[in-house]
Image: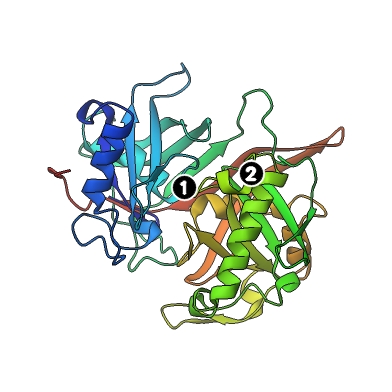
Amino acid sequence: MRGGTSNALLFHVDDLPPAGPTRDDFFCRAMGSPDPYGRQLDGMGGGISSLSKVLFLSPPSRPDVDFDYTFGQVAIDQHLVDYSANCGNMTSAMGPFAVDAGYFQAADGPVLVRLFNTNMRQVVHARFMVRDGQTVEAGDLEIPGVGGTGAPIQLDFMANDEAGATPLPSGQVVDGIVDAGGAEVAVSVVNATNVVAFARAADLGLTGAETIAAIENDAALMARLEDLRRRAAVVAGLADSEDNTAAASPKIALVGPPAPFTALDGRQYPAAAVDLSARVLSMGNVHRAIPLTAAMCTAAAAAISGSTVHGARQAAGDAAGELRIGTPSGVVKAAAEVTHIDGQWQVPRTSTFRTARRLMAGWVHG
C-alpha cells in the first residue's frame, strides 16, 4: 500500500515467520535487501528509504485499541530491519488495511480505527470513510510528494502515557552539541510521535531550504550530519555510545526561517507560503518531502519556547495553530497540542491528514 508519501508491504502477524532473525530474513528478502547497487531490484523495495518499509497488524495488547501494529525500516544496502521508530505516513494505511483485508468490520460512513504502535508505545486514532465495506480512496485532498488527490485520513497521535515519557529526552529545550570538527551546533531533541534532532541550519552555514542534491552531493556535509545525529542520540540518552545509535532514530532535521524554494514538481513557493523551512534525513538520505512523524514532531517543537524550531518559526510571526513546513516536495501542514505546566512541557496530541491507497494484494516471496 501507499500511505502518504511512502510505500510498504503490509502483513498480519499470523502470516509471518516467528519474530527474530527468521522474520527479518523474510522482510529483507521480500524487499530486495541488501543490494550493493542500491536499487532493490530483486524485491519489492524502491531503492530509497521511503519505499523500503514493512508493517504488520497484531491483536490488541491493551483494551483501548482495536489492533497493535509494528513498523520496520528495511535498510537498502544492509541486512537490517530497524524497529526503533515509527512511520507516520504508513500509519495512515493501517486502518484502511484492517478494513479492506477483512480484519475490521466497519459499517458504511465515518470509521474510527484505534491503533497502538509498538515501536513508540503510542496510541493513534485513524478516521476515514467506508463505503460498501471498503475504504473510500477517491477524494480531493492533495499532499505534497504524491501525484493526484485522495480521500482524507485524519490521524491523531496521542501522548505516550507510559512512565518516564517526555517530549524533551535530554532534559533541555536546546543543547549545544560540539561536532567532530569542534564547532558547536544548537540542537533541540524532541520526542513527539518520533524522536527528531532539530539542528539550526545557520550553525552549519545552511538555510534549511537547500535542494536534496545540494545536501546529498556534499559528502562532508552528509558525514557531519550523521555524526551530529549520533552525538545528539547520546546527549538525549537514546544511545550509550555513538556507535550504538539506531539507524532510524533519532532522525536529524535542518530547520531555518521561511525561504522561497522550488519543489520537486517545479512549483515555486514564496517565503510567505511557509512558517519555516526543514530538510529531514532518514536512513542516510534526504527525505523527498518530510517523514510524517517528523512533521508532527516539528509542529510540537515549534510550540516549545526556546527550541531551534520555535526560533525558526518566529521569523514568520509566532502564530498559533497549524504549522506550514517548507519541504522539498512542497508545503506540509501539521498541528500539535502543547502544554507547559509547572515547568514541564507535554504534547498531549499531534494531528495531520494523509491519503492512502491499496496498490495490490497477493503473495510476496521471501
Vertical relation: 5 (above or below) 16: below
Q: Which residue position is annotated with label 2?
A: 241
Give the quadrant of residue 4: bottom left
Q: Please tell me whether residue 302 is drawn above or below residue 87 in the rendered image.
A: below
Identified at 67% across, 43% down, the residue is 337
The quarter of the displayed image where residue 107 is located: top left
Q: Which class describes the residues within 10 Å of circle 1: few (<14), some (14-19), or many (20+)?
A: many
Drawn side of residue 122 relative to residue 181, left or right: left
Which one is in front, 167 or 216? 216
Q: Where is residue 198 in the image (x, y as percent from the top left)?
A: 67, 57
x, y (%) of residue 286?
49, 66
- The three-letter code of the residue at mark 2 reads Ser
Q: Are marks 2 and 1 in contact (CB under 8 Å)?
A: no
Element under label 1?
A: helix
Identify residue for label 1.
Answer: 88
Q: Which of marks 2 and 1 is in front?
A: 2
Q: Classify the position of the C terminus by image quarter.
A: top left
> Is any part of residue 319 visible from this angle?
no
Task: Please tell me how crowded label 2 is: few (under 14), some (14-19), or many (20+) other residues with Cα within 10 Å.
Answer: few
Q: Can residue 254 be seen in this view?
A: yes
Spatial CA distance of label 2 from label 1 is 27 Å
**Depth check, front residue: 42 or 135:** 42
Dot 2 falls on a residue whose secondary structure is: loop
Q: In the rendered view, does 92 fall on the left or right side of 227? A: left
In front here: 295 or 82? 82
Closer to the camera in the image, 151 or 292: 292
Q: Where is residue 322 in the image (x, y as percent from the top left)?
A: 63, 56
